[in-house]
Amino acid sequence: MSAVLEEVDRFEPMVKPEQVSGPPRIAGRDSALPAWLVEEREVPERPRFDSAVIIGNGLAALSCAARLARSNSFSGKVVMMGKPPVPSRRLIAGLTLRARSLDYFSACLGISRASFIAELYQGHDREVAALEQRIARYQGTGSGPYTFGKRGMWMSRWNHKGRVVCYGVRNSHLVDTIYRLMDHLDISWVDAKPASISDCRDVAKGHNPIIINATPMPLAGTGVVATKPKNFVVASQMLFSNERQREKGILPPNTSFFTARRRAGRADASVWYPVWDPLSPTASFYGITYRVVKAGEGLYKDAEIDIQTSHLYGLSEALGLSPVDPQETLGTAMVPCSNWNDVHQYTPGYLHLGKLANLGTPIIAGDGMVRAGNAAFVAAEALIAGEEVQPMVSRAVRGWAQRNRLTHHAITSLSLFADLGLRVMPGTALNLIQDFGDTWAGLE
Ligand SMILES: Cc1cc2nc3c(=O)[nH]c(=O)nc-3n(C[C@H](O)[C@H](O)[C@H](O)COP(=O)(O)OP(=O)(O)OC[C@H]3O[C@@H](n4cnc5c(N)ncnc54)[C@H](O)[C@@H]3O)c2cc1C
């Protein structure tokens, strides 16, 4: 066992599996949930729809399907449109999993957070639990060694009362875990890409279905037109092994790391988390580098991605981490940003869950997966209770979107101040925009 893992072994999780039973409490100021969910009242099922068709196979689609299929009203009447998920070693979507996300996924599945963690990490959760996040400004261009300036702590164990703040997970492993945990539920799959609402209605198991689009793209025939994004996020991410981590002395066990620097008016940012991946067992860290770029003629996608990938290699070297099979694990992306405003378009019998959950700038705040879980949970509960689903989801996601907006400005329009803060007092500077609520650790 490596020295780093020996140290990890000394860390005892706050909540032991035997102390937890049943789905977790979802209350907490982050969730802005309908009152009956916060108070954990039993609400009678009185749905306005007799069945559901869900487009997509990601976290939001599966979680929403699981909660609906566990109800008396929708059991046997949930149809998924798309292919069942297939895990891949490549890092295609998010890996920074706020511990809070586990509450929403577990609640949708009707199991405890501890049971979910046990299935997800197969006994490796203590290695990948991040209890704090350290921070430093970096210097480096890709042609020489990368170095770090003054170091600080912006999310400390003290701030989060010793609870696990975050875990590292490959998105497709998380999706696969949820998929396996819902295997017993009566849900059908139709391998088709619907072109309209009527395509969805054709496969429904009722006369009055709710159509839930859990993909980012609008569905034709809903009257919604995709708008041109003003900004994109470019990102590059990969898995790493940690043979030289201790020698460099920057990343202690159970610690994540944020680093950034300003270039041409905006920040090049990067986060690093401990990870466990069953398809890449030698990997113990993941790193991502990212930047918000303006859309338009001046945007050269390949060049921007190349810069992010060269930062990834340079930073990993400085942290004492070595790439694990880049040809199979390296993932790059350019993802459009939207604005943060509530969605006012409304199509009866249709919910664009994928859009509502992901309003704002993706990737930059490690909030995509937690928002997918939150929106899916609220959508399913509102449908079962017979409430107006879109306003309920909008209300739940509003707080997340506004916090996302703050992070966006910190690394774009206000990056001069952020960079100055990083140079002079890195921990304190980022502390100013930290959310001390339950949005990271949750309540357990
Ligand atoms: C590079 C990158 C890094 C990220 N980092 C983080 C992070 O660290 N932490 C975090 O929390 N979030 C992160 N995110 C965001 C996070 O991955 C997403 O917010 C989250 O996965 C959203 O889940 P979802 O289920 O709503 O949608 P998705 O994960 O987008 O799932 C939608 C699924 O639907 C499928 N689909 C698309 N169109 C159709 C169709 N017509 N029919 C059927 N199926 C279809 C897609 O293949 C996809 O599998 C990152 C995203 C990217 C791209």
Image: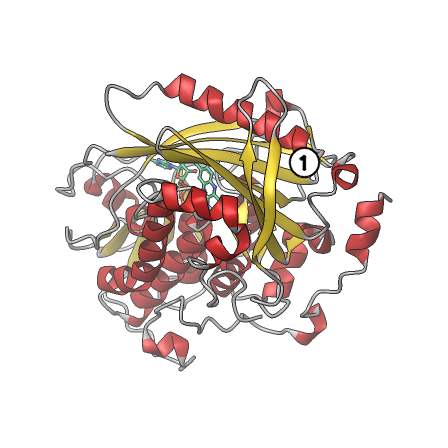
64 versus 113 height, above or below: above
Q: Is mark 1 within 8 Å of ligand 1?
A: no
Q: Which residue lies furthest to the front in this view?
A: 424
Q: Which residue is drawn at 32% across and 40% down?
A: 216
Quarter of the rendering containing residue 374: bottom left
Q: Which residue is drawn at 27% across and 20% down?
A: 298
Quarter of the rendering containing residue 299: top left
Indicate left or right for 48 with 41 as reference: left
Indicate left or right for 256 with 288 as reference: right
Asked if residue 186 can be seen in this view, the reply is no
Q: Between 223 and 407, which is closer to the camera in this rendering? A: 407
Image spot of residue 357 (x, y percent): 34, 51
The quarter in which the N terminus is drawn is top right
| Secondary structure state at the residue bearing disc 1 | helix
Q: Between 79 and 42, which is closer to the camera in this rendering? A: 42
Q: Which residue is drawn at 85% across and 46% down?
A: 3
Amino acid type at circle 1 is Leu
Q: Which residue lies furthest to the left in this view?
A: 223
User: Looking at the image, how many numbered discs can be counted on the residues?
Assistant: 1
Q: In which quarter of the image is ligand 1?
A: top left
How many other residues sit within 10 Å of disc 1, few (<14), some (14-19) or many (≥20)? many
Image spot of residue 77 (x, y percent): 36, 56
Q: Between 299 and 431, which is closer to the camera in this rendering? A: 431
The quarter in which the C terminus is drawn is bottom right
Asked if residue 420 can be seen in this view, the reply is yes
